[in-house]
Amino acid sequence: MKISIRMDDITPDMDWARFMRFKALCDQYNIKPLIGVVPDNMDENLHIDTPETAPVTDFWQYVKTLEKDGWCIAQHGVTHIYTTRKMGCFPLNRLSEFAGIGYEQQYEALSRGRKILSDHGIMTDCFMAPAHSFDRNTVRALKKLGFCRMTDGFGTVPYSRWGMVFYPISYRQGSVLKKRDKEGYATFVVHTNTMKDRDFERYEQLFAAYSDRLVSYADLLQLTPKKRGVLGSAVEYLMAVTKFVLVNIRGL
């Protein structure tokens, strides 16, 4: 299977040292990830650096430079503040910025986030839900706003559902790495803000060992999506619930 990378929680006050360290690794192997940009970050957990300590003077211009270099951009929520404990359509977490909230409220918030990005010259049709959590109202609002892609779900190829194209993330990295000869794609989710030295070392080893399987995210966007039916959706939902349970058991 081919492997792509998505990087979450991209903000003006993210941990720039960690971001730049991972970017250098991507540059070394000529990988162009998908980055999830939070339009109006209000999450205290993501307030790490200050504009004075950031290595770039204009965050939004820097994002546009990455895009020109082949990186893909997704709108990553709006404020990244979790307002409900609903699991939504893809139940990996019991917290959400959107799931369980009415359509009009979601539309208004998502529209504001989209405008913030567009006001800075960033146009994208791809959405990345914080905590992987969204519901049908989220999808309805996104479609009305012109989004047609979401980075979530499980599977080996992009699939269409509810009039949206989903680009799956990996269920478990270890199982993906074992499938060297299997057809398909998997996206590894990276949160550089919380990465430790051991995490960087693991990715350094992974990129070196599997360099022939690494692809840029733009390659995924060129694929023709498959139609996903009721059975496939049910299997995905059960997989997400199972992973949620296993992760929380290990955390006890």
Image (spheres, helix red, strand yellow):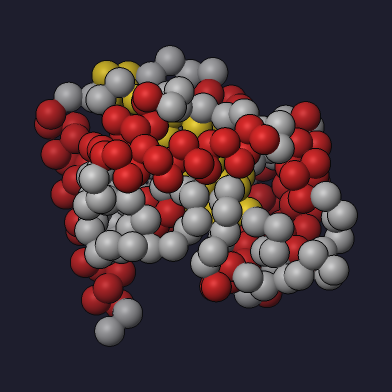
Left or right side of 248 for 15: right
On-image quarter of the C terminus? bottom left
Residue toward you, 155 or 182: 155
Residue 57: name its quadrant: bottom right
Residue 212 in view in this figure? no
Single out the residue that lies furthest toward the bottom: 252
Residue 19: name its quadrant: bottom right
Single out the residue that lies furthest toward the top: 224
Q: Is residue 40 above or below residue 158?
A: below
Left or right side of 130 for 51: right
Residue depicted at x 29% and y 30%: 140
Residue depicted at x 19% and y 35%: 233
Residue toward you, 15 or 109: 109
Residue 227 point in image, percent of width and height? 27, 19
Residue depicted at x 27% and y 73%: 248
Residue toward you, 216 or 42: 42
Residue 113 in view in this figure? yes
Residue 136: name its quadrant: top left
Q: Is residue 99 above or below residue 228?
A: below
Residue 206 point in image, percent of width and height? 62, 54
Residue 119 point in image, percent of width and height? 67, 35
Left or right side of 148 for 47: right
All told, the count of numbered labels is 0
Left or right side of 167 for 106: left
Residue 70 point in image, percent of width and height? 72, 30
Residue depicted at x 61% and y 41%: 116
